[in-house]
Image (cartoon, rainbow, N blue to C red):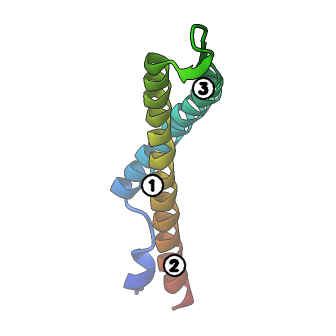
């Protein structure tokens, strides 16, 4: 006679398909995240060009248009960092709950 707890530990085809979809998403996300990190690294030196010298009054000012563009682009890349943190927390929590579930089944 089959133990119902052990038979439920075997993954169903729907669960396998969902796991493959999640792995596919994570692979795509990692590529997108690396691209956004590279863009952020290329974008950071742009902040060095924001301050400019005003020749007529010998004063240091900031280029308003460049400052806005740099801040908006950097904020956009920061959203990718925030989303990556959310993805990492979700996947670690999801993995931990599946691992704990399987350990409980194996102990019985």
Classify mark 2: residues with Cα within 10 Å, few (<14), some (14-19) or many (20+).
few
> Would residue 26 appear left or right of 15 to someone viewing this image?
right
Q: Position of residue 40 (x, y in %)?
A: 58, 30
Q: Nearer the viewer, residue 11 or 29?
A: 29
Q: Position of residue 60 (x, y in %)?
A: 60, 22
Q: Which residue is mark 3?
A: 47
Classify mark 1: residues with Cα within 10 Å, few (<14), some (14-19) or many (20+).
few
> Would residue 80 appear left or right of 42 to someone viewing this image?
left
Residue at 37% in and 61% down: 12
Number of marks in the rendered image: 3
Q: CA distance from mark 2 to mark 3?
A: 47 Å
Please say if the residues under marks 2 and 1 sit with CB atoms less than 8 Å apart: no
- Vertical side of 75 occupied by 54: above or below: above
Please say if the residues under marks 1 and 3 sit with CB atoms less than 8 Å apart: no
Q: CA distance from mark 1 to mark 3?
A: 28 Å
Foreground mark, 1 or 3?
3
On residue 86, which mark appears?
Answer: 1
- Vertical side of 6 occupied by 68: above or below: above
Q: Which residue is mark 2?
A: 100
- Vertical side of 81 occupied by 108: above or below: below
Q: Image quadrant of residue 103?
A: bottom right
- Does dot 1 land on a helix, a strand or a loop? helix
> Would residue 49 appear left or right of 80 to someone viewing this image?
right
Can the viewer see residue 24? no
- Does dot 3 land on a helix, a strand or a loop? helix
Residue at 43% in and 48% down: 22
Q: Nearer the viewer, residue 91 or 52?
A: 52
């Amino acid at each position: 006679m089959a133990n119902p707890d052990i038979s439920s530990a075997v993954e169903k085809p729907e669960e396998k398909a969902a796991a493959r979809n999640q792995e596919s998403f994570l692979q795509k996300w990692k590529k997108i995240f690396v691209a956004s990190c590279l863009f952020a690294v290329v974008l950071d030196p742009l902040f060095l060009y924001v301050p400019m010298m005003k020749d007529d009054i010998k004063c240091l000012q900031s280029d308003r248009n460049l400052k806005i563009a740099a801040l908006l682009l950097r904020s956009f890349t920061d959203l990718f960092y925030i989303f990556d943190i959310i993805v990492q927390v979700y996947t670690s929590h999801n993995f931990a709950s599946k691992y704990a579930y399987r350990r409980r089944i194996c102990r019985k």
